[in-house]
Amino acid sequence: MSDRFPPIPPVDLSPGQRVPATKLSNMFGDTGVFKYKNEDGSMIGPYSASDITRQAICEPREQQLALLAVAAAYEASYVLYAHRLIAASIGLFEVEISNASKGKLSESLTESESVTFTTAYELAKERGPLRESSWNRALTVLGQEKTAMIAHLVSGGVYTCILLNVGAIGAPE
C-alpha cells in the first residue's frame, strides 16, 4: 500500500469520517472476499483516501479550475460550456477560463489554484500513479486532504466527461 494516504485508526476518525466507515463495515462485514481494512479496523485502499477527504474543502475557484482541467483533457464540450459559465459567475477572469479550457495554466492564478489546476490536469491526462514530483508539490501547497479532494473532483469529472463523450452530447446551441 502507498504511504500517501495512510490508514486512520478508528479511534482517530472524526464524526464525519465515522459515518462512511460504519457504512462500509455494514456493507462488507467480514466476508473475506477482499481486504478493505487492517487488523485494527483502519480502512485501506481507496477507503483510506475517502476517509481523509471528509474534512477537506476546496475553494470555489479551485473546484472550477479542477473541473475545467478535466473537461479540457477529455474535450468534453458540454462540461466546458457549463463550467466556463460557472467559473465566470464566481470571479475567474476570462483569460483564466479560456486558458484552463485549453489545458493551459494562467500566470494570474494563486499558487494553490495553479497546483490544483496542474494536479487535476495531470490526473485527467495521464494514466497510472501521480508523478512523485507532482504529489510532493501538491502535498506541500495543498496538503494531503485537499489533494485527495482534488482527486475526488477529478474522478467525478472524468466520469461525467466520458459519459457525455460516449453520448456525443455537446454544448447547447
Image (tube, grey):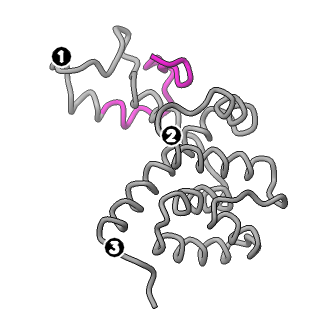
Q: Look at the picture and state if 117 lies above or below 48.
A: below
Check residue 21 for magenta coloring.
Answer: yes
Measure the C-alpha gap from mark 3 to mark 1.
41 Å
* Nearer-the-camera pick, 1 or 169: 169
Point out the frontmost of discs 3 and 1. Answer: 3
- Residue drawn at x 59%, y 45% as measured from the top left: 122
- Residue drawn at x 38%, y 10% as measured from the top left: 40
Task: Tell me where residue 35 sits by quadrant.
Answer: top left
Instruction: Find disc 1 in the rendering and name its residue.
Output: 32
Q: Which residue lies furthest to the bottom in this view?
A: 173
Instruction: Find disc 3 in the rendering and name its residue.
Output: 168
Q: Look at the picture and state if 148 lies above or below 109.
A: above
Measure the C-alpha gap from mark 2 to mark 3.
34 Å
Secondary structure category for the residue under label 1: loop
Instruction: Kindly identify the amino acid type of the residue bearing the numbered disc 2.
Output: Arg
Instruction: Kindly identify the amino acid type of the residue bearing the numbered disc 1.
Output: Gly
Point out the frontmost of discs 2 and 3. Answer: 3
Q: Look at the picture and state if 122 lies above or below 9.
A: below
* Nearer-the-camera pick, 111 or 164: 164
Instruction: Find disc 2 in the rendering and name its residue.
Output: 54
Q: Where is residue 34 in the image (x, y as percent from the top left)?
A: 23, 20
Mark sitting earlier along the chain (1/2): 1
**In this rendering, position of residue 112 left or right of residue 35:** right
Mark sitting earlier along the chain (2/3): 2
Mark sitting earlier along the chain (3/1): 1
